Image (cartoon, helix red, strand yellow):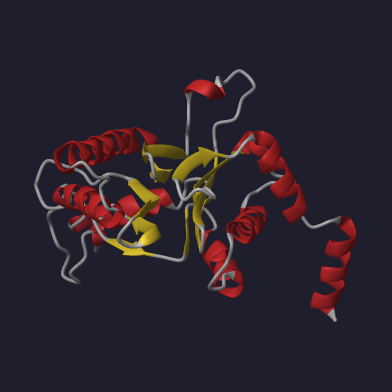
Amino acid sequence: MARRYDSRTTTFSPEGRLYQVEYAMEAINLAGSTVGVLAEDGVILAGEKKTTSKLLDQAKQHEKLFQLDDAMFCAVAGITSDANILINRLRLTAQQHTYSFSEPMPVEQLVTSICDYKQGYTQFGGLRPFGVSFLVAGYDAHHGFQLYHTDPSGNFSGWKGYAIGVNNNTAMQIMRQDWKPGMKLQEALDLTAKVLVKTMDTASPTAERLEFGIVYKTPEGQVKFRMLKDTEINKLMADATPKEGEEAAGAATSTS
């Protein structure tokens, strides 16, 4: 049945579905694990890189995390070339707002603007939806630290913790169990590392395959964005990886 209605973005099926938009969402489930966690004093995004090589110049290339302005950044899951177009638009929109109004753009307003643009690509013939989802994290004076998810249909939603990409159902289940109100940044980092250990297809994940970024407040009250260093990521992942004794104990508990 789907084949009669999936050749065009603008054609509804008798069930009221837009198959091309749904196919775009499926492309995101093949991307590397991408996790966002909101804390009381900051917000974290982390992602699994699929392209790893010792010949790759990491200083000139990011695969998962991209800064948008001083207090906002995003994580990407899906087709990276599509994401580059949208990231440039996000950055331009944020800077135009700052230039026009002499204040940083509110996070939700920026997310709304890019989702309106993405929605247009589902409504007009001759276009295809962007095959990319974002987790957008940031801070503004109106609502503090925030985390949003966007999808190819143009929908967005705010979250305390969210995961996109491969094994996202497992990641969401862990966060539903372990996320709690009032979490501090370090606790949220530990939770993010725990989620990635469970969802990645390697027994010992390291900084070579991961990117971590945070927006946080300094003791002076200034909001800053920074990428975590490789040493910090390796320590987080090592602490979150179950040791051999713990694994054996967990297996014994589950079988008893």
**In terms of image quadrants, where is residue 2?**
bottom left
User: The C terminus is located in which quarter?
Assistant: bottom right
Spot occupied by residue 186 in the image (x, y as percentages of width and height): 63, 56
- Can you see residue 203? no
Q: For the view shown, which residue lies furthest in the right direction?
A: 245
Coordinates of residue 137 in the picture (x, y in percent): 41, 52
In the depicted view, which residue is nearer to us: 178 or 170? 178
| Residue farthest left in this picture | 125
Q: Quadrant of residue 144?
A: bottom left
Horizontal side of 152 relative to 164 (left or right) equals left
Seen in the picture, residue 38 relative to 61 is either above or below; the reply is below
- Work out whether residue 210 or residue 168 is closer to the camera in this orientation and state it: 210
Which residue reaches farthest front?
A: 220
User: From the image, which quarter does the N terminus lie in?
Assistant: bottom left
Residue 129: give x, y in percent of width and height.
Answer: 23, 47
Percent x, y of residue 97: 19, 42
